[in-house]
Image (spheres, coloured by chain):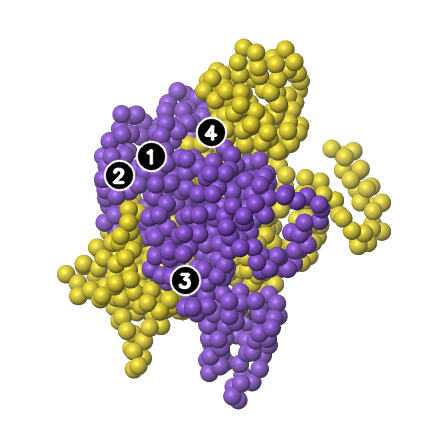
Chain colours: A purple, B yellow
Amino acid sequence: MNQAVQAAAPAAKRKPKETGVPDNKKFLHPSLEKNYGNWKYHDRPRPGVLHHVSHSGDQVWSVRAGTQRQMDIYTIRKLCDIADTFAEGRVRFTIRSNIEFIVSDESKVAPLIAELESNGFPVGGTGNSVTMIAHTQGWLHCDIPGTDASGVVKALMDELYDEFRREEMPNRVHLSTSCCEINCGGQADIAIIVQHTKPPVINHDLVANVCERPTVVARCPVAAIRPAMVNGKPSLEIDESKCMCCGACYPPCPPMQINDPENSKLAIWVGGKNSNARGKPTFMKMVASGLPNNAPRWPEVADAVKNIISVYKEDARPWERMADWIDRIGWPRFFEKTGLPFTKYLIDDWRGSRANLNASTHIRF
Amino acid sequence: MAKQMHDTPNLDQLEDGPWPSFVTGLKELAKDKDYVVDLLGQLEESYKTRKGYWKGGTVGVFGYGGGVIPRFTELKNEDGTPKFKDAAEFHTLRIMPPAGMHYDTATLRQFCDIWDRHGSGLIAFHGQSGDIMFQGATTENVQKAFDELNEMGFDLGGAGPAVRTSMSCVGAARCEQSCYDEAKTHRAVINTFLDDIHRPSLPYKFKFKFSGCPNDCMNSVQRADMAVIGTWRDNIRTDEALAKTWFAKHGMDELVNDIVARCPTKTFQVKELKKIKTGEHISTVAVSDTHGIEINNQDCVRCMHCINVMTGALAPGQDKGATILVGGKSHLKIGGLMGTVVIPFIKLDTDENLEKLVDFAQRTIDFFAENALEHERTGEMIERIGLANFLDAMELDVDPAMVNSPRMNPYVRTDGWDDEVAKINAKKQAA
Ligand code: SF4
Ligand code: SF4
């Protein structure tokens, strides 16, 4: 895709050193290096702290804190100062952009937590908490976004702040948000994903120059796009009765604008799980759509997510992830308890969809 | 001092509330950088109009074909000049982190200094692919920033139709559930494909992810073309002291309702001590003076649940390795796909065994490069050609562990049946 144009530097061009993934050994906390592959068990003395014990008898406490992921250098330097004072100058990040400080002296845990929180970094995100939202780039840096990512996350984490700092959920709650239907945010217990509701609006003047038309035709999952002459210029047209507004044609052909301030909505999906614990991994399911893309704080989305979380918190049994809980109570009860309307759009008609229909008399009344 | 800030009434509202604010961070940077003043101006415009204003293009570093995400502003004045001229170019460098995302502060501070000199000062730890994202440099500065980061021992990650940057969990470094050396395996595999990372020429992206156990903390099953997920073949290990400590704290109700009832195959049982069976495939441990746990490991699917609940009291076995699944991906274009098992178990404990994994990865990528259609992921390719054909090409033996169930329809031509049976029998005899 991005065939790089080499920067127009003269004569002596520096050849890259193709070093690949660096060895992590020199970055490990000394106790992690010493006990590498030799850990015995862990427990959680309080939310935000993991306590690991090695077969050697060594112990470490990992203190986990939330960050804004998109960090300015002053924030990073502040975190470094904290690591230098308390954690032997080492940190690591989790897949959900939480930062972890590792200490081998228990007496440092409380002052480290105090230091983090007094600098505005919430300590939590461990065990059965609502942890940091996995998110994408959005308006800040993506070339195809229907909404922002960092802003949605900030607005939501403000609302979920207490649940991040507590461990009061039945099991862990993973959230993600994605600014287009590609869903870069991934599977989660609750996911927020852009859902377009109108076909792309085509700027026919630009298509011929900007888009490789056969590529665009091939990209459409429902073969709704065909080449056409419009106003005497080669362009593309869409069979709007076929188009399901996925936006797949937009990245290869930006003149097919799919994003719309009013008609690009947000949908909520639930029950995704990557872990193999208990049941097999599951894909999440769409349970709500039509929520407005209401920047800068997306209150309707925040309310919907908080509602699902509170019903789950109230109703699920210990260790039930969102998917396990819904498995037990069934979908009718899920919609009843959350008050979400079950509309015809939630009945799957994509390929393989018959497997999602109820081919039995198993019904909870 | 930088130029005067634009009004940002929308973004200002993202400074309220207790969670750390990226807007506050950007404003700090904007005090010294016109670049970030204008970035905030453009972002505010997006918040106002609910539209994105970046487009791609072609920017890179000398010697590589990918790894930089180019962004040029599309917010223009009538005369075609950028509305926010100081942020007209806002490219991102994707840099591969050390496996497990461990850092020392000297390295992080050096990142900050480099990005202060050559970029916006905004860094994401980390992007969804696992890269450190140095966000915001002009075309001119991309090379300068890369040269300095590269001299530190860091290299660009993947973008476009390439092998992508990978992720591995904390694993052996700090997790008792780790079933192989995730960091070592991650490096051995990824550093074999640097050419395919740096010079995109595959049909589409190819992602590896490495999780140390079936908890799959790297979400590999649904995002990796090749997921390497740790597992074990022998019996779950037990520790009586920790089991008794757990039981003293949690009691019989929790043992029954939270573990026995949730074991997916119901192979986990609680019994009176005198009724507990022993045997080659059975793990047992007392939880009190009267009761104990009995697990028939032949019926255990290595789901991790009981081990997660009673960590230390129960632990993965010692004959460790990994399961390899191929073909996971997200929504576009045919809908999300989970990876599916192609190698039920592979040892990864020696360099020789690691080499076998690398070789399999190489053959998979070669096959993908030759057989996938443009913009087709491995999962879509396998769906199109059928798993059996893929296994055949990879010279992998079919195994019932690869399916949920055998076929449920008769639409297959089976005139090669006897030959297949003969081949399987011959292999069995040779073994
Ligand atoms: S939005 Fe999706 S369905 Fe509609 S034309 Fe584009 S690719 Fe096809
Ligand atoms: S790891 Fe095995 S024994 Fe334990 S809950 Fe899972 S299937 Fe049951």
Residue where numbered disc 2 is placed: A116
Residue placed under numbered mark 1 in the picture: A63
Determine the CA span between mark 3 and mark 1: 35 Å
Please rate how many residues cluster around mark 4, counting C-alpha atoms within 10 Å: few if below 14, some from 14 to 19, many from 20: many
- Whether residue A59 is visible here, answered yes or no, is yes
Q: Nearer the viewer, residue B418 or A159?
A: A159
Ligand 1 contact, mark 3 (Cβ < 8 Å): no
Are the numbered discs 3 and 2 placed on the same chain, yes or no?
yes
Comparing B57 with B272, the one in front is B272
Question: Which of pointers 4 and 1 indicates the residue nearer the eye?
Answer: 1
* Spatial separation of the CA atoms under disc 2 and disc 1: 10 Å
Q: Which mark is residue A293?
A: 3
Instruction: Looking at this view, name the residue that lies furthest to the bottom.
Output: A232
Residue contact between numbered discs 2 and 1, judged by CB atoms under 8 Å: yes
Q: Is disc 4 on the same chain as disc 3?
A: no
In space, the residues marked 3 and 2 are separated at their CA atoms by: 33 Å
Q: Choose the circle earlier in sequence order: 3 or 1.
A: 1
Marks 2 and 1, the one that precedes in the sequence? 1
Residue B148 in the image: state x and y as whole percent: 30, 53
- Whole-Å distance between the Cαs marked 4 and 1? 17 Å
Q: CA distance from mark 4 to mark 2?
A: 27 Å
Instruction: Name the residue at 30% across, 41% down.
Output: A122
Percent position (x, y) of residue A157?
36, 48
Q: Which residue is mark 4?
A: B176
Q: Left or right: where does residue B12 sit relative to residue B412?
A: left
SS at badge 3: loop
| Residue type beneath disc 3 | Asn
Q: Amino acid at mark 1?
A: Val
Helix, strand or loop at disc 1? Answer: strand
Residue B312 in the image: state x and y as whole percent: 48, 24
Q: Nearer the viewer, residue A244 or A34?
A: A244
Q: Residue at x 58, y 41 (%)?
A: A329
